[in-house]
């Protein structure tokens, strides 16, 4: 995880130093859920989460750092809401049914979601449902494989972005705006210094 934050594929531009520091802290921040929070969620959902998924929640269930940036990750108290949204997506796509013990933990831009089957076992297969598809597909055989795949995608995306020269990032009031100079311009953001407003 640290490697994802040490080699930045961007340079700050038109951003205060304080906003940049807060942004970097958000990318590096990892915090987990307490056993009490996990058990409360299990009672509310009437399931027993797989051990591998519980371990993930304990390590980074509240803040997963740079992991899953660009997707919406459910907080413990939102798992029921995510399930309801998933059912709506499946109904619109004529998919279904969503198993009673499915725990939806991630949404991507309102058309795709990931879930595990909460059977209380050791590990969890991760399933992905995408609007327009006839049924959910098996996305990863284990939760550890799922996390490793996510890390690898981030590393690959960062590597490709670095090879292309990176991008400028403006952060203001917690919102981010990226600017990619045209390749023909010869401007490579990663070869420049950060440009702070203060």
Image (cartoon, helix red, strand yellow):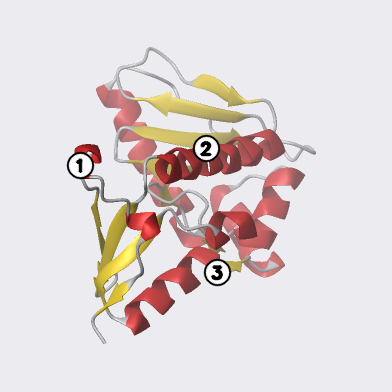
Real-space CA distance between mark 1 and mark 3, rounded to the nearest whole angstrom: 32 Å
Give the total of numbered labels.
Answer: 3
Real-space CA distance between mark 1 and mark 2, rounded to the nearest whole angstrom: 21 Å
Q: Residue furthest top?
A: 134
Relative vertical location of residue 171 with respect to residue 105 in this rendering, above or below: below
Mark 3 is surrounded, within 10 Å at the Cα level, by few (under 14), some (14 to 19) or many (20 or more) other residues, namely some
Q: Are marks 1 and 3 in contact (CB under 8 Å)?
A: no
Relative vertical location of residue 118 with respect to residue 196 in this rendering, above or below: above
User: In the rendered view, does 121 fall on the left or right side of 65?
Assistant: right
- Of label 1 and label 2, which has the lower sequence position? 2
According to the image, label 3 marks what residue? 29
According to the image, label 2 marks what residue? 156
Q: Is residue 83 visible?
A: no
* Residue 47 on image: x %, y %: 64, 44
According to the image, label 1 marks what residue? 182
Q: Residue furthest right?
A: 122
Mark 2 is surrounded, within 10 Å at the Cα level, by few (under 14), some (14 to 19) or many (20 or more) other residues, namely few
* Residue 42 on image: x %, y %: 62, 53
Task: Please name whichever residue, 57 or 147, is drawn nearer the observer in this view of the structure.
Answer: 147
Q: Residue at x 23, y 81 (%)?
A: 197
């Amino acid at each position: 995880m640290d490697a994802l934050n040490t080699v930045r594929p961007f340079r700050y531009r038109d951003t205060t130093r304080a906003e940049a520091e807060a942004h970097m802290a958000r990318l590096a921040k990892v915090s987990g859920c307490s056993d009490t929070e996990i058990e409360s969620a299990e009672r509310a959902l009437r399931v027993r989460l797989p051990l591998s998924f519980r371990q993930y929640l304990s390590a980074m269930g509240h803040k997963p750092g740079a992991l899953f940036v660009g997707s919406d990750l459910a907080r413990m108290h939102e798992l029921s809401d995510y399930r309801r949204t998933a059912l709506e997506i499946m109904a619109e796509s004529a998919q279904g049914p969503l198993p009673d013990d499915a725990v939806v933990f991630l949404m991507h831009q309102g058309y795709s979601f990931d879930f595990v089957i909460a059977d209380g076992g050791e590990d969890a297969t991760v399933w992905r449902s995408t609007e327009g598809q006839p049924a959910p597909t098996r996305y990863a055989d284990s939760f550890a494989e799922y996390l490793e795949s996510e890390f690898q995608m981030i590393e690959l995306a960062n590597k490709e972005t670095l090879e292309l020269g990176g991008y400028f990032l403006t952060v203001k009031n917690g919102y981010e705006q990226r600017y990619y100079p045209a390749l023909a311009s010869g401007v490579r953001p990663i070869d420049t210094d950060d440009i702070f407003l203060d």
